[in-house]
Amino acid sequence: MSKIFPVDAAVAASALINESKYFELYQASLDNNDAFWAEQGMRIDWIKPYSQIQDVSYAKSDLHIRWYHDGTLNVCANCVDRHLPEKASQTAIIWEGDNPENSKHITYQTLFDEVCRMANVLKSLNVSKGDRVTLYMPMIPEAVYAMLACARIGAIHSVVFGGFSADALAGRIIDCQSKLVITADFSHRGGKSIPLKKNVDDAAKIAGVSDYLESVLVVKNSEVAVDWNDSLDHWYHQKAEQVPAECPVEEMSAEDPLFILYTSGSTGKPKGVLHTSGGYLVYASLTHQYVFDYHPDDIYWCTADVGWITGHSYIVYGPLANGATTLMFEGVPNYPDSSRFWQICDKHQVNICYTAPTAIRALMREGNSYVESTSRLSLKLLGSVGEPINPEAWQWYYDVVGEAKCPIVDTWWQTETGGILISPLPGATPLKPGSATRPFFGIEPALVDGEGKELSGEAEGNLIMKRSWPGQMRTVYGDHQRFIETYFSTFEGAYFTGDGAKRDKDNYYWITGRVDDVLNISGHRMGTAEVESALVAHPKVAEAAVVGYPHEIKGQGIYTFVTLNAGLEGNEALRDELVKWVRKEIGPIATPDIIQFAPGLPKTRSGKIMRRILRKIAEDEFANLGDISTLAEPAVVEDLIANRQNKK
Ligand code: PRX
């Protein structure tokens, strides 16, 4: 029996949604789905109002997803311009630098001025409606200006997280054929400088990139000089002086693309998840308001990076569509020391703090004194996202950080879903540590077995969604067939999430993790296939297999089994070389935790690597290997066990 934390009566009284209202609205949202979404669509401003609500088919032969599709709008106008009459002098963004001495408040008026300026710079660089623009940016306000500037002129942004390498960046520029990259000279994290512009220079030299890339726009974020290519590079501050201050908005159809965001799948190269304008904004704004119980004047902080979907939906689009004050942090949780998060809460009087289990676990390990040295009196609500939160970390977050006064919303969702699908609502949902609890309005989850048969009542199975919601991704950029195969082929007529889940007797959902070959490292998605193909590209590597294993801080770590070319011996120097190689091919976020040199890998007689066995070895479950008699060479397993590497 897991513990239950009832809804606090005072929280319920002041919250937007209490428990009975949740049940009533949830039922209505399913019974009268179109009426529900027709009403919710009106929370944003439309240039031409919609008359159509949804046009969705999950059938493989005719897969399409359209919401509000005869309406027109501009996302940037919704996030900025429409707040000016009442909120011009309200803070839109609080920016907190890596260096605790640097912070600034950006009003909605300033945001408007800066976004218009940036939009005109993009136009001056030949960017227009429908063009793709890649952002490779630090967590500085210009990253938000750039996203909104793209939205203003109808360009499609593709934000690439700064922890990806030049090679990974190049692949993403080529895939969506970007004509412009926006970057900064350096990014600052934890007192260190990361040479973003240098990575862009390296990416620009990679074969294929110059077919599309016309310009690189560089924001000055440091006093250190960088290499310069006059035919490609432009300083943002210089261009900004040369353009007009006013920039009209582009009228966009609800289904015009807003952004592409690359994410790892179980096979092949990362997929360009495509989100469109109207439905995405309605869903991001609605979930931001209800899940975080956002009230006017609340100070809201999501600690994610804008390079991930969490940053897109819950630093930028959701909060700004709601006219909120959103905090953006350039740095890391443990710099200058492990009290930084809580110092930021005190400094800016943060009311809502939304972070990831990996950060919570890392801070928990440092002890309570870093938390207890701060007041945190302003905090009302805590949030968690990215991976299952273990009950111990949940309890620490609740007791020590929130002092048993703040509900925790454990929000389950994905890059593909655009916004939160399963989560407690603070005034409505009794909490169980480790459970994402109940579906949001309009969301109809179900559990199915391996054959696609729906399971009822208390059950464990594959998590699917039976109907669409406005924030759902529309396609894989440039590869609609892959979209259909990845999400709509495993279970006929439903969206397959790739996650497993349990449902308990109270109808609460407990996410158990991925059921495919996708790892979740510190809340970041990484395909085993991606790491494997990086490794086999090394001239000394014949074959590689990658699996996840439980890691105390990161949730999962990357365990790699590597077979070298004939005649080569593995040693520490080669391990270091391979680690560096993967960091170059993909980026620091894919750094293998463990490399085990293996003379052979367990394979079936038809040559398929049996990952099930490798996973068990990585998890130390030697007694539990299952049937190995079908292996081509059962002896390789003994060698793998005998040479198992110690975990870090
Ligand atoms: O496995 C689930 C896990 O993260 C995956 C989605 O990763 P990504 O697209 O990078 O988006 C992360 C931020 C939304 C999911 O398939 N996941 C996300 N949130 C949770 C979670 N697992 C358990 N509990 C969560 N709250």
Image (tube, rainbow, N blue to C red):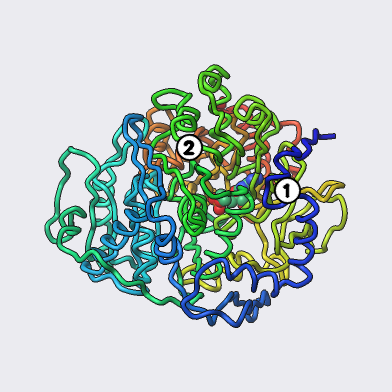
Q: Looking at the image, which residue is at 26% across and 67% down?
A: 246
Location of residue 190 (image quadrant): top left
Is the residue 288 above or below the residue 362 in the image? below
Q: Looking at the image, which residue is at 64% across and 67% down?
A: 469
Q: Looking at the image, which residue is at 46% across and 27% down?
A: 343
Is the residue 450 above or below the residue 402 in the image? below
Mark 1 element type: loop
Quick one: label 1 or label 2, which is nearer the N terminus?
Answer: 2
Spatial CA distance of label 1 from label 2 is 29 Å
Q: Nearer the viewer, residue 526 or 355?
A: 355
Residue 630: assigned label? 1
Is residue 554 at all visible to an observer of this figure? no
* Direction front: furthest residue: 86
Q: Looking at the image, which residue is at 46% across and 58% down?
A: 262
Residue 390: assigned label? none
Location of residue 102 (image quadrant): top left
Residue 592: assigned label? 2
Q: Nearer the viewer, residue 45 or 74?
A: 45
Mark 2 C-beta closer than 8 Å to ligand 1: no
Name the amino acid type tagged 2.
Pro
**Relative image position of residue 506 (x, y in whole percent):** 85, 47
Q: Judge the density around disc 1: few (<14), some (14-19), many (≥20) Cα neighbours within 10 Å.
A: few
**Relative image position of residue 336 (x, y in whole percent):** 39, 24
Does residue 117 appear to the left or right of 413 in the view shown?
left
**Which is in the foreground here, disc 1 or disc 2?**
2
Q: Nearer the viewer, residue 346 or 54?
A: 346
